[in-house]
Image (tube, grey):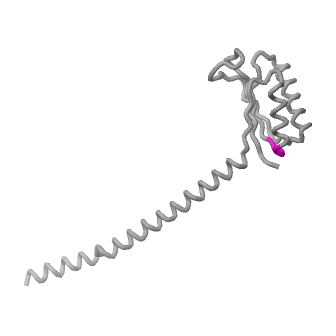
Amino acid sequence: MRSYELMYILDPKLDEDGSKALLVKIEALMLKQGVEIEKTEPWGKRRLAYAIKGNWEGSYILSYLKAEPTAISEMERRLRVTEGVLRFLTVRTDEQQAKLDRRKARGDEKSQARRQRKAAKSASESEKTPAPEAAAEALSAESTNSAE
């Protein structure tokens, strides 16, 4: 089973009972397809960037799911024809997480190499410049030689 996020926008003209009934209907549809619902977060009504079916607002719902790809495609097919659903988007999250992990590992390797180069550079610079005590001794030896 793969992990997915499903964001869908419900018609804002539905009253609270109507939107709850539609939400129950959608969840039943998902369960019937063999989709495991991990969590559902209602985001409330929000303004849309552009009008969808004449609506400038929509009720956003975010669901975290686990399912087989065939179940997701059937669920999406049914969501397309469900009255009251303005839009939906399904995203595979395990793929995104893998990309983030690879990017982080690559960044860790680069930062480790950068730290090693910096440490090597500072070590070579410390060999070139004398320590403060050695510089002070050299100055005092120079001043005693010039005084004689």
Q: Which residue is at the front of the view, 90 or 139?
A: 90
Q: Which residues are magenta?
A: 65-69
Q: Position of residue 36 (x, y in %)?
A: 86, 42
Q: Position of residue 106 (x, y in %)?
A: 57, 58
Q: Which residue is at the front of the view, 122 or 84?
A: 84
- Please, is residue 105 above or below residue 82 in the view? below
Rendering quarter of residue 10 = top right
Q: Which residue is at the front of the view, 93 or 114?
A: 93
Rendering quarter of residue 30 = top right
- Please, is residue 75 above or below residue 96 in the view? above
In the image, what residue occupies the spot 65% across and 22% down? 48
Q: Residue furthest left?
A: 148
- Our reading of the magenta stretch's main secondary structure is strand
In the image, what residue occupies the spot 82% across and 39% down? 72
26 on left or right of 43: right
Q: Position of residue 130 (x, y in %)?
A: 28, 75
Q: Which residue is at the front of the view, 116 or 106?
A: 106
In the image, what residue occupies the spot 42% across and 65% down? 118
As for residue 71 lying within the magenta part, the answer is no
Quadrant, the C terminus: bottom left
104 on left or right of 24: left
33 on left or right of 123: right
Q: Residue furthest right?
A: 32
In the image, what residue occupies the spot 68% across and 53% down? 98
